[in-house]
């Protein structure tokens, strides 16, 4: 028995001995996170990068390589991503690999990295802030963006004059094909010359070798399904389209029997809108709760009169949508576009499909009671002419008479006739019956 225990202990010691080198190797292995930044720079991209950087930090990564290929995007999103990089590089080195283009907002992001490497055909620059129409923004916004570009360069020890020239065309750098009136865009060689790049590499593997990371474990992060939806939904071009679909769908659904495709499209569009903005971190649950309250008030309007619940519900929904976005002014414009589309849709529906619609038939009387359909506005009782009756109310000049047990509304011929007097019907004009007083014993004139 003792021999058995001794052999077992020796075997355990042997396993421990042979496992030590492997454990040491794993602990010593370098780890690099490969994160791609492509397409447009928007709020959904920020959510993806934040999650990827957090994973890299928790895994103890030695470096994060941010592979960039973008024509830019939105300055507010770029600013937040820049701050994220600044916070992350305090713990983990961040290397920007410009694999083709880092233009506009992409240039701003790249300048925050500890190191920048470029592919042979890579370019960085052309970072002037523009509005939705492609025109230069107002001076206040332009000044702020120029300073942010300079700060991005300074944060990684680069000369800010070139970042300034990328965002403002008032600097003459003709040696880099950027005279006055032209924005600076640097090629790979030019970027290396002005120390905006640590070198030019032809591949990702060469980049790893340049930084002594060729033996590192590479972890490639992927955009999750939810992050993909968020990137699509939070795109400023998609937002007004999505809200317009929701508004038009609700209008069509109101004029249709039951709950069908238009209502489903509207609800799906709204759910996508809030889901994407929640994932991107733009909207909080309070905005979603406000939207649900607004929707509940509108439903309540169908059961109570007054219109107050409907108005409050509509206001709550509009406010929740505006608060869900990063830029309240842009969201307000998007809501106005959606309302305009919904109103236009309503007008078209009423003009071309009004008689076929379920709710419209309940709200508006579509049938006419004309004589061609057998309807008459009133009965012309010419048979009453010359007949006698008694007043049961005073005629001032209108009142009521009684004739053979029938009560009839009449008017006097002009004079006042007291209650209980004898009258004779002298004229019938449609629903207007005219009487005059007479003495029972006298002659009828």
Image (tube, rainbow, N blue to C red):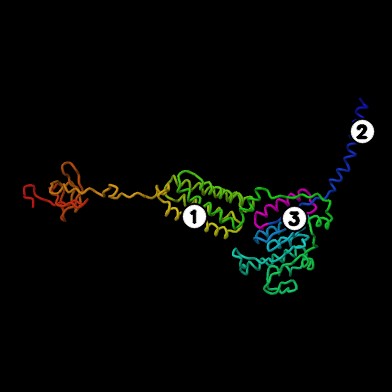
- Tell me if mark 3 has few (under 14), some (14-19) or many (20+) residues whose alpha carbon lies within 10 angstroms of its own: some
Q: Is residue 161 located in the magenta-colored stretch of the structure?
A: no
Tell me which secondary structure the magenta stretch mostly adopts: helix
Label 1: few (<14), some (14–19) or many (≥20) C-alpha neighbours in 10 Å: many
Given this view, does label 3 or label 1 mark the residue nearer the observer? 1
Q: Secondary structure at mark 2?
A: helix
Disc on the earlier residue, 3 or 1: 3
Cα separation between marks 3 and 1 = 45 Å
Q: Position of residue 240 (x, y in %)?
A: 56, 56
Label of residue 10 in the image? 2
Q: Position of residue 265 (x, y in %)?
A: 54, 48
Q: In the rendered structure, which disc, 3 or 2, sits on the residue that comes first in sequence?
A: 2
Quadrant for the N terminus, please. top right
Nearest the eye: 312 or 202? 202
Element on which disc 1 rests: helix
Between 177 and 133, the one nearer to me in the picture: 177
What is the CA distance from the residue labelled 3 to the residue labelled 2? 47 Å
Q: CA distance from mark 2 to mark 1?
A: 81 Å
Q: Nearer the viewer, residue 321 or 351?
A: 351
Q: What residue sits right under mark 3 in the picture? A: 88
- Are dots 3 and 1 in contact, CB under 8 Å? no
Q: Secondary structure at mark 3?
A: helix
Residue found 86% across the figure and 43% down from its top:
22
Q: Which residue is mark 1?
A: 342
Which region is colored magenta? 39-64
Is the residue marked by circle 2 packed among few (<14), some (14-19), or many (20+) residues within 10 Å? few
């Amino acid at each position: 028995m003792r021999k058995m225990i001794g052999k077992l202990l020796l075997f355990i010691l042997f396993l421990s001995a042979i496992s030590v080198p492997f454990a040491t190797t794993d602990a010593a292995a370098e780890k690099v996170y490969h994160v791609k930044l492509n397409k447009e720079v928007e709020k959904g991209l920020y959510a993806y990068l934040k999650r990827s950087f957090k994973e890299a930090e928790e895994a103890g990564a030695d470096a994060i390589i941010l592979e960039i290929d973008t024509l830019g995007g939105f300055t507010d999103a770029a600013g937040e991503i820049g701050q994220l990089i600044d916070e992350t590089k305090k713990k983990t080195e961040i290397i920007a690999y410009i694999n083709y283009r880092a233009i506009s907002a992409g240039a701003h992001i790249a300048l925050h990295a500890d190191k920048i490497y470029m592919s042979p055909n890579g370019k960085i620059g052309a970072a002037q802030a523009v509005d939705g129409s492609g025109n230069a923004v107002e001076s206040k916004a332009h000044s702020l963006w120029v300073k942010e570009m300079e700060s991005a360069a300074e944060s990684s020890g680069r000369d800010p004059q070139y970042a300034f020239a990328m965002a403002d065309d008032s600097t003459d750098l003709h040696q880099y094909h950027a005279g006055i009136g032209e924005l600076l865009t640097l090629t790979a060689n030019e970027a290396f010359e002005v120390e905006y790049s640590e070198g030019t590499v032809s591949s990702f593997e060469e980049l790893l070798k340049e930084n002594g990371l060729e033996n590192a474990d590479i972890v490639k992060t992927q955009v999750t399904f939810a992050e993909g939806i968020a990137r699509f939904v939070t795109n400023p071009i998609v937002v007004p389209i999505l809200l317009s679909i929701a508004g038009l769908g609700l209008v069509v659904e109101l004029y249709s029997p039951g709950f069908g495709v238009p209502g489903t499209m509207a609800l799906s569009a709204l759910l996508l809108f809030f889901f994407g903005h929640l994932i991107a971190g733009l909207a909080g649950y309070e905005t979603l709760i406000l939207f649900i309250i607004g929707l509940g008030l509108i439903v309540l309007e169908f059961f109570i009169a007054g219109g107050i619940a409907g108005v409050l519900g509509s206001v709550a929904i509009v406010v929740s949508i505006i608060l869900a976005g990063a830029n309240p002014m842009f969201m307000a414009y998007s809501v106005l576009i959606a309302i305009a589309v919904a109103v236009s849709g309503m007008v078209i529906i009423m003009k071309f499909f009004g008689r076929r619609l379920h709710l419209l038939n309940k709200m508006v009387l579509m049938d006419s009671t004309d004589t061609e359909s057998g309807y008459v506005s009133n009965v012309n009782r010419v048979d009453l002419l010359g007949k006698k009756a008694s007043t049961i109310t005073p005629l001032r000049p209108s009142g009521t008479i009684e004739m053979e047990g029938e009560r009839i509304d009449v008017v006097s011929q002009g004079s006042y006739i007291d209650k209980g007097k004898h009258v004779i019907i002298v004229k019938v004009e449609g629903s207007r019956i005219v009487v005059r007083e007479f003495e029972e014993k006298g002659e009828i004139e």
